Image (spheres, rainbow, N blue to C red):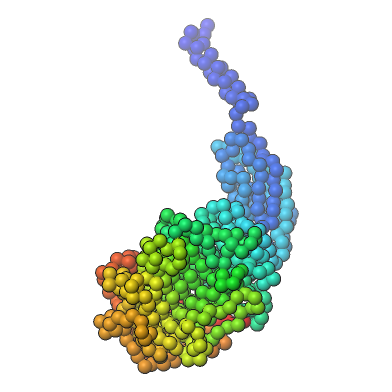
Amino acid sequence: MMSRSRAMLWAGLAAAAVAAAACEDDPSGPVLVAPAGLQVTPISPSALRISFTAVSGATGYVIERATGTATFSIVAEPAGTSYDDTGLTPSTAYRYRVATKIGSQTSAFSTEATANTPAPGSIVIDTDITTSRTLRADTVYTLRGFIHVANNSTLTIEPGTRIVGDFNTLGSSLFIMRGSKIMAMGTAEKPIVFTSSRPEGQRQPGDWGGLILIGNARINRTGTVNLEGTNTGANNPAINYGGGVDDADNSGELHYVRVEFAGYGPAPNQELNSFTFAAVGSGTQMDHLQSMSGLDDSFEWFGGRADAKYLVSYESGDDHFDMSEGFSGRLQYLIAYQSKVLVPRTGAGNVSNDPQGIENDGCDGASCSNGQDSQPLTIPLVANFTLVGTGPGPVDATQGGYGMVLRRGTGGYYINGLVTRWPKAAISIRDQASTGARISNGDFILRNVLSSDNATLFQAGQITVDATANALESATTSANALFTAFSADPSNATQLDWMPAAASAARTGGMAALTGAIATKAGTFLAGTAFRGAVDPAGARWWQGWTIYADN
């Protein structure tokens, strides 16, 4: 006869078994089934997108892939219902299937779906990008029209990718809108290139628009501030970059990027630039960027606090480096080279009548609430710049031809520079009431700069500073003697070797130890150097391999 305690034990075990069986049969619990709706979509010659319908209660999925009739193998175990399978072979058929995971259990696999990777070729982008997207190096992308990366999306660009602005669609440009990001991750071996759709030998400045980043940092203009080159029609709406509040805003990353033959003007005197940074914040990372043969400015900053290193500008239609509207970022290692005035494409706009190496302004116009003293002030730190002009001839009849024009209330710290071959003067400091106030208040410092082969150090009749006290050296050396290799009209970039020659005065004379306001501004982003100019005589030729020289 079974004891009372043993009977109770058996009863308890039986009840537990019944409960477990009931749980397994509970229609309200997770059901271990394979996902439905499996689709495989080509997104580039080397990538396919796998997507399917979510399964209730799933903790993950297993994706398997096979080529042709080969055996399946696992390629990913994503948590979500979409996966980009990259690194594939172009013009190849791939099979996929997917299973559901719930905890430690895995369902049977779904029915198969098949897709072919396309052959290498090109893709046209003619609508705004409003969801995150990746541009891949095995495809040439054509921008057709004013393209906006919007809706807080991210555009990722692989190393070696080529993007062309459609010559036949006037103003084709790429705008990274406020709140969105660009992740252009080029390398020295595989730079990312934005260029004209026309063949080599036929390209001209202004063939297409340019690359524009709009951030949420502060500027010193008030109200609605429309970006130059926008608001010209329904296909090119106004873009307001005013009202920003976050100086640390992040618009993404640009590494080893070239922009060529850009600067189209959608309206008279409204040209776009090769690179435009409008209210871009310090969270944005930028280095190794080249502008080549653009119609308007090569690099232009409208306010913001973005930092950058290793910038190259060859043959600009206007200024090589232009900063205004409260820009307060830090820039180091800049090269500007101008040998001629290029002819732009017909109808794209006109080359500037005042081209300069650097042109910096405070605030100018009706939306400056306190005129040229409007806050925040333009106070960048620009270190280790090499600015090479045309010499006498090409721009003599223009208002330009100055290595540096600092005016309209700009401040800033300009150190360890090299300025050569400018036919009017190395430096022009203008507007005594406002820019002069910056000098008096210590917000404007110009030190350890070598002037060589210029008409004069300072523009006559304008502001000057004490050359001896500020280590501003005026040498009689020609540009040819400053650099390892220098051609006034190079056919390729190898004829431009910016490494200081063995006897070059640029090898010494730099501010090696930063102090005071300059050191505070520099922080950990940049350090002083014993040399002047953009290239360390004991360092690497950092511009070689990823930049080029071409004027058509």
For this rendering, which residue is in front, 344 or 1?
Answer: 344
Q: Quadrant of residue 174?
A: bottom right
Residue 494 picture location, percent across and down: 52, 85
Is residue 178 shown to the viewer in this render? yes
For this rendering, which residue is in front, 25 or 37?
Answer: 37
Compared across the picture, whether 37 is left or right of 331 comes to right
Indicate whether 232 appears above or below 491. Answer: above
Indicate whether 105 appears above or below 275. Answer: above
Q: Residue at x 41, y 79 (%)?
A: 404
Q: Quadrant of residue 522?
A: bottom left
Residue 450 picture location, percent across and down: 35, 84
For this rendering, which residue is in front, 97 or 390?
Answer: 390
Q: Quadrant of residue 542?
A: bottom left
Residue 31 picture location, percent across and down: 63, 32
Q: Residue at x 60, y 43 (%)?
A: 61
Give the tally of numbered discs: 0
Image quadrant in which the C terminus is located: bottom right
Is residue 498 shown to the viewer in this render? no
Q: Residue at x 57, y 87 (%)?
A: 491
Compared across the picture, whether 387 is left or right of 474 comes to right
Q: Residue at x 50, y 60 (%)?
A: 225
Residue 414 picture location, percent across and down: 35, 75
Residue farthest front in this picture: 366
